Image (cartoon, helix red, strand yellow):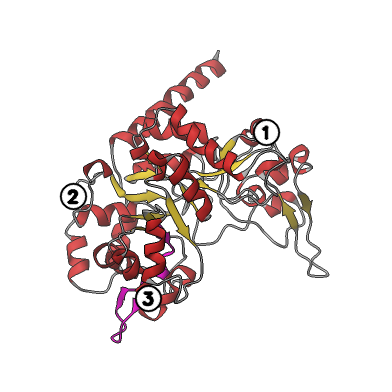
Amino acid sequence: MKLRLLVTMVLCLVPLAVAQAQASVEVGPRPFWLVDDMDEGPLKQRLQACRTKTMKRTDFSIGHRGAPLQFPEHTRESYIAAARMGAGIVECDVAFTKDRQLVCRHAQNDLHTTTNIVTVPELNAKCTQPFVPADPASGREAQAECRTSDITLAEFKSLKGKMDAYDPMATTPEEYVGGTADWRTDLYSSRGTLMSHRESIELFKTLGVKFTPELKTPVVEMPFEGDYSQQDYARQLIAEYREAGVNPNDVWPQSFNLDDVLFWVNETPRYGRQAVFLDMAEPTAQNSSLSYMEGLKKQGVNILAPAIWKMLALNGNQEIVPSEYAKNAGMAGLDMIAWSLERSGPLAEGGGWYYQSVTDAINNDGDMLTVLDVLAREVGVIAVFSDWPATTTLYANCMGLASNSDDH
């Protein structure tokens, strides 16, 4: 009887948690901690003046994998946290299982670092590369590679999400699943509920947020098992939104593969209108040129999403300004989305990969808000992916950008 009562109480609390995430926006202390860390100036003063402002959800703020700075990525808990922080759009990266079901995972082959699969003997045995312990004497690192396509949806759902990390010198599976960076946390890793793509759609509808699924590039040879093609995969992603009755205006499908984007543009034009081309290529004179950007636009691409650093440069005064890449994209009529704020660790030493074009202007964590301001006001991005959406939500509310996509 006690067990039945406990289960009933838990089931009652789940919809309550979802409803609370939908009803209120809580940015918490971190964004203001970052504001206080900024260099003195008008931007800092304006953001400090927002301390008592009631925050609204905004489509400018995209939950990148949910809120993975502290919550296990692509889990129910991470998605709910992102919605609570005011993200108007939340991302489910999409991969497929052995039985060709779509699931939320950053890569087809990251189960060994983002879940507990290597600690589950019967599933570890199904991995492309089951766990092999490190040999500290020789310096050989531990090995493992586990793919969504190695297991079925039911097996995938039996796993628990964790922070994306591993211990390369682990000699046991339990050691291997450790290794979380010291600027992240395992405080919320005790619960990491994995989700299918369909389940994410239903959750996001309940949360009142919009959708940006990313079709992850497969690591297996396509067509998978000889008859599941890349176009089948891309078509299936859109079909699940149609089946769920989701308005195409609320969906921003993404891919690093331009052919996927053009497939959506041409075969599913209502969903393809907001298809996002994720641009990972190293910038060159050719692929940063106005003619290249105009070529994308002529093919039907409307939204370009490069890493933060590709849109920024330093002027002669070491001030952060829009790059030629960003200026040419804007001149060609392309909307831009930036990724990913809060993905780096502490910025005291320049910010790492995401800030590489402006390293000399970065020396404290507050500088990420300066970067965000240049992206928003000078580059003119329409949204920003963030690992901690509260920061982007605060900025958008303080700067008058907290309107929904329905308004434009």
Task: Kindly report which numbered mark, 1 or 2, lies closer to the viewer in this rendering.
Answer: 1
Q: Is residue 322 within the magenta segment?
A: yes
Q: What amino acid is found at the position of numbered circle 1 in the picture?
A: Asp
**74 or 96: nearer the viewer:** 96
Is label 3 in a helix, a strand or a loop?
loop
The location of residue 340, given as percent across then percent down, is 43, 59
Of residues 280 and 13, the one drawn nearer to the viewer in this rendering? 280
Magenta-drawn segment: 304-323
* Residue at image coords 37%, 54%: 303
Viewer-side label of 3, 1: 1
| Residue 366 in sight from this viewpoint | no
How packed mark 1 is, by other alpha carbons closer than 10 Å (few <14, some 14-19, many 20 or more), is few
Residue position marked by numbered label 1 in the rendering? 99
Q: Are marks 3 and 1 in contact (CB under 8 Å)?
A: no
For marks 2 and 3, give the CA distance.
Answer: 28 Å
Of residue 6 and residue 230, the one placed in the foreground of this image is 230
Q: Is disc 1 in contact with disc 2, using a CB cutoff of under 8 Å?
A: no
Label 2, on which residue? 53
Q: Position of residue 210 (x, y in %)?
A: 36, 40
In the picture shown, does residue 344 fall above or below 112? below
**Which circle's residue, 3 or 1, is located before the other in the chain?**
1
Q: Secondary structure at mark 2?
A: loop
Q: Height in image: 68 above or below 38? A: above
Number of residues whose C-alpha sits closer than 10 Å to that of mark 2, classed few (under 14), some (14–19) or many (20 or more)? few
